[in-house]
Image (cartoon, rainbow, N blue to C red):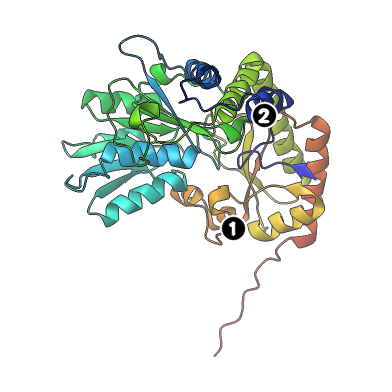
Amino acid sequence: MIYLDYNSTTPLLDEVVAAMAEWQTTSFGNPSSQHAIGRRARQALERARDEVGRMLGAKLSGSSGDRVIFTSGGTEANNLALLGLAGFSDPDAPPGEAIISAIEHHSVTAVAELLERHGWTIHRLGVTRDGVVEAAGLDRLLNDHTRFVSVMLANNETGVIQPVAEIARRCRALGVPMHTDAAQIAGKLPVDFRGLGVSALTVAAHKFHGPLGIGALVLRHDVEIQPHVVGGFQQEGLRGGTESVALAVGMQEALASWEREKDARAERLRMLRDRLEARLQEGYDRPVVVNGAGALRLPHTSNLALVGQNRQALVMALDLAGVACSTGSACASGSSEPSRTLLAMDCDTDVLAASVRFSLGAPTTVAEIDEAAARILAAGAKIAVAEPRHRTPAR
């Protein structure tokens, strides 16, 4: 099996497994315990927190230090950020307005829909044909009632990188908090929390060869949110529950592994992505459309339409042929509906019908890419959709 679905999840690197092993066995202390074993666990946890924050461009020290809140993953971090900024846990808080983009991950759009059911007004920013959020549209939507804005840093389906720094600048001018979902870009390209100027930022360890079950929300020092997981004093009371030292250490090591070879890894992934796209465009007898090709993209993500194919039939055929890929976000992979992202990009019908996402990771090799391209072309040749016949109208 050739795995080309790294945007859904990634395997643990060997060094991550090794870093976690001690904290899963002999050093098992509760970081809230006062004895020596607990204090040692606390030191490892806080060291991981500091390092994760540093590698994401946050500044955790000093009186105006930012905060890193560990969560169970990206979905919980997005929920904590948006429901926390909305004050959703306060039954007396009046509904307000918020702005998201039309291409957000389901863990953001679902929160927006929840708020709408409770009387909120949610505005959605459109995107260009290349999938870039139209930052200029923000100016007509921002007002005194806007409680937050949320725009992802890079799209999980197309890999298109978004103008988050520009959007954050417009938000700051009116004192509106801005959140960005950086789950797909962290551990792939540099993330500079302070440089972006956002109020909150989400990451998920399993997207960059770290462990499943841990994510983080980075919060600017002056941002106030309400918790929605209560029952403990941990993490400043913003997310109750005993922290997993092993998962935090694993997340730290996964990011550190990327940091040690970030330039070389990005260049290699970009080369592999371009090689896959070129092989398919050369070998397919119909157009191959690269969605988002005109925009700046993540180096490891390729969303391709093999025109004439049915995306779901192609993904199933590729699974049988030993190539793992997807039709879009893993959280919506069971849906037969077209991609919300591609709909927002106003893609042609034949592109919508045929688009498949291929995503690469640190273990991906040239040989895998070449073999995957051959299998994709072979599968496409077998199941190509016949041209529709034009029926003569009945008289």
Looking at marks 1 and 2 on the same chain, the residue that comes earlier in the sequence is marked by: 2
Q: Residue at x 35, y 14 (%)?
A: 65
Q: Is residue 303 above or below residue 268?
A: below
Q: Residue at x 67, y 22 (%)?
A: 19
Q: CA distance from mark 1 to mark 2?
A: 49 Å
Taking the image as shown, residue 259 lies to the left or right of residue 64, namely right
| Residue of label 1 | 353
Q: Amino acid type of disc 1?
A: Ala
Q: Residue furthest top?
A: 62
Which numbered circle lies on residue 25?
A: 2
Quadrant of residue 382 in the image?
Answer: bottom right
Q: Residue furthest bottom?
A: 395
Quadrant of residue 184 in the image?
Answer: top right
Tag nearer the camera, 1 or 2? 2
| Between 51 and 383, the one nearer to me in the picture | 51
Which numbered circle lies on residue 226?
A: none
The 10 Å Cα crowd at callout 1, few under 14, some 14 to 19, many 20 or more, is many
Question: Does residue 305 appear in this view?
Answer: yes
| Between 338 and 118, the one nearer to me in the picture | 118
Q: Residue at x 61, y 16 (%)?
A: 259
Question: Does residue 310 appear in this view?
Answer: no
Question: x, y percentage for residue 197?
Answer: 35, 21
Question: x, y percentage for residue 365?
Answer: 79, 31
Q: Is residue 124 above or below residue 57?
A: below
